[in-house]
Amino acid sequence: MSATDPDCLFCKIVAGEIPATIVASDERTVSFMDINPATRGHALVVPRAHARDLLEIAPEDLAAVALAGQRLARTAHATLEADGINLINSCGADAWQTVFHFHLHVIPRYEGDPLRLPWTPGPGDMDSIRATGEQLKEHYS
Ligand code: 5GP
Ligand code: ZN
């Protein structure tokens, strides 16, 4: 049984207590769509076990998240025709972290897209997020 924090949003997503568009999951990780997407296909990879941030996550979970992030990046590149990918982790409030369960942002980039860092999160269109998540899920390999 993995460590969980009853007050943690991402622990609740991992446990299925809060709905999310899940793209992929394995023994150690869950990947799901960000509800405030910076670009089309923006997803998050989290460890199942609660860890606050990069300083606390167990090495095995960090490795598993990195591998899942690579798979998702390859899927976004092939399926969404992303021209590039940003993998971003924010560690600590001063580094823009807002949810304190370790997560890797997988942000597909498109030639000429307007995204600049740090981005200002805003709600996405849920139908479009779900549809893009289904596309990634179908082609995830
Ligand atoms: P951070 O700012 O900690 O690096 O990233 C947290 C991310 O979690 C943000 O991009 C934010 O949009 C996303 N997020 C916050 N609440 C929810 C939620 O309830 N569901 C999903 N899928 N993503 C969320
Ligand atoms: Zn958690």
Image (cartoon, grey):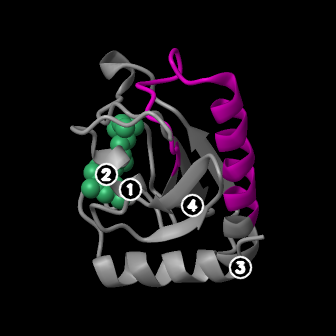
Alpha carbon separation for disc pair 3 and 4: 25 Å
- Residue 63: in magenta span: yes
SS type, badge 4? loop
Query: In this orientation, does residue 36 appear?
Result: no
Alpha carbon separation for disc pair 3 and 1: 24 Å
Q: Nearer the viewer, mark 3 or mark 4?
A: 3
Residue found 48% across the figure and 61% down from its top: 32
SS type, badge 2? helix
Label 1 environment density (alpha carbons within 10 Å; few <14, some 14–19, many ≥20): few
Q: Nearer the viewer, mark 1 or mark 4?
A: 1
Q: Is mark 2 within 8 Å of ligand 2?
A: yes
- Report the magenta residues as a range: 45-74
Give x and y (percent) for residue 94.
33, 17
Q: Amino acid at mark 3?
A: His
Query: In this orientation, does residue 123 appear?
Result: yes
Give x and y (percent) for residue 61.
64, 34
State ligand 2's quadrant.
top left
Residue found 50% across the figure and 38% down from its top: 2
Q: Quadrant of the C terminus?
A: bottom right
- Residue 130: in magenta span: no
**Which is nearer the N-term, disc 3 or disc 2?**
2
SS type, badge 3? helix
Identify the residue position indicated by label 3 in the image: 139
Q: Residue furthest front?
A: 1
Identify the residue position indicated by label 1 in the image: 15
**Is the Cβ of the residue at disc 1 closer than 8 Å to that at disc 2?**
yes
Residue found 27% across the figure and 39% down from its top: 8
Give x and y (percent) for residue 10.
36, 47
Identify the residue position indicated by label 4 in the image: 112
Identify the residue position indicated by label 2 in the image: 12
